[in-house]
Amino acid sequence: MKQSVNIASRVTGRTPSAPVFRQAWLRRALIIAVIGYSALHLAYSVCRYNIVRGQGSGDVLRTFQELQEWRQTGVLDYTGILHPPFYYALLLPFSTLGFDALRYTLYAIQFPLYVAAIILLVRTMAVGQPAAAHYLIAAVLTVNFQPFLETLAMHKVEGFEFVLLCTAIAAFKRRQDVRAGVWTMLAANLKYLPAMLGVYFVIKREWRAVLGLLVGFLVCLAVTLPIFGARTVWSSLVHPAAILVTHRHEGTRPEASIEFQTLQGTVNRWFVGPNGMMQHFRTQGYPQVSQPRVAWAIGNVLRVVLLGFYCYVIRRRWRPHQRDEMWLRYVCEMSLTLVMIFMLAQASRVNYAVLLLPAFVMMGLMLYQHPERFGWAERLLFGAAYGCTAMLIPGGVLNRLPPHPVWGTYHSFAYLWFSVPFYGYLLLGLCAMRCHARLLREGSTR
């Protein structure tokens, strides 16, 4: 038998392990293709959309102008500002240096901060020393993530919130719970949405992290009170609640926009017809919702249901000394927590989904590192979630496809109008819940 195998090998030129070699070659080719596409995707985005080409300083300019107005009048209009007072206090030194100094500084410091944040996430997920494959996976997931690329191009504050969230998660993994709470509160005081991670600490009764939240809030007050006065307390507490539940602020009114990739924004678009959709594509104006009360009621019912389900999923509490043992369950819960931001917020811009990037990186690394624990169902859910959210084909390229009978060449707008990213968020949450349930079953059988 052995002799016949050798003869067959000489005749065919193949060895019995040829299928294994072919698989290895295909795997290497796929890896090279993914790396090449990722490099081109990043290069295309950075070269076409950057500060030199005049891209995306709108939010920064508005903040700068509001600071200039405060310097002249001593009044900061808290009902119309985009950020908590702490963010304005951090940018205050630049108000005397000029707008160019501010925007070029914000653009430049992003790059090292993002690299450091991704390294933190990889080390947080690694058991022992991280492998090169772990860094490669994290890098590929990051540079193909359209909300990240948009945040990078526009040097928006959500990028710095992302860095602070990564820092908070890393500190929590190391059982530095007070620091985790402080970093989370600082992120929430740049813009309100990261406060959802603080809600998670409260629900989980992580009291040292909750103490950190209080310390962080006191630090922000200590910085802002001497500058902006006592109304900063109102702006830091009451204003976020008003944005969450009222119709008085931009993006929270009964209107539709492709930017609002949230539960309520998706429901609102259900009540706008094709004519309103095309008008929005052409003018970027906000079309009115035909049945605003119905849309508001549907959104609220779905919010309550999802919030109740979320609280049920994360209800278990583990001791700090179990942190390493239970870390994968924490990863699933914190990923689900970040998804809940877009279930509860009334409106968000597309780039706000950069706050989901820690969840995608952690979940992706978890699925790669533990193939014996998770199957194809979890991987398919994760891949579908990432594909929907990341927008793997850049919008500028997508719009060059042949025109559609309904929306013409507005392909990237249609992608957002039909809430493809939002449904990606839902799939990520479903993946996190499925992984969490599998881990719980695994624990109960030990």
Image: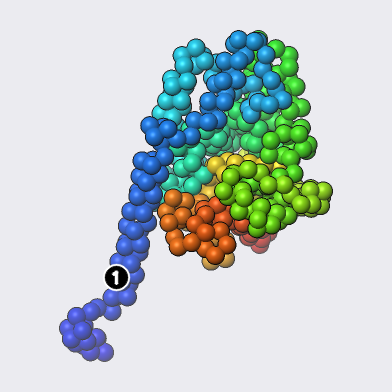
Q: Residues within 10 Å of mark 1 (few under 14, many from 20)?
A: few
Of the 4 image quadrants, the one containing the C terminus is bottom right
Of the 4 image quadrants, the one containing the N terminus is bottom left
Residue 163 visible to the viewer? no
Residue drawn 57% across and 65% down? Answer: 377
Q: Is residue 318 left or right of residue 428?
A: right
Q: Which residue is mark 1?
A: 21
Q: Position of residue 199 (x, y in %)?
A: 71, 37
Q: Position of residue 206 (x, y in %)?
A: 69, 36
Q: Disc 1 residue type?
A: Phe
Residue drawn 74% across and 49% down? Answer: 289
Q: Position of residue 372 (x, y in %)?
A: 52, 62
Residue 397 visible to the viewer? yes
* Secondary structure state at the residue bearing disc 1: helix
Q: Is residue 233 left or right of residue 369?
A: right
Question: Residue 327 or 297: which is nearer the viewer?
Answer: 297
Q: How is the image coloured?
A: rainbow
Q: Is residue 346 above or below residue 85?
A: below
Residue 10 image-quadrant placement: bottom left
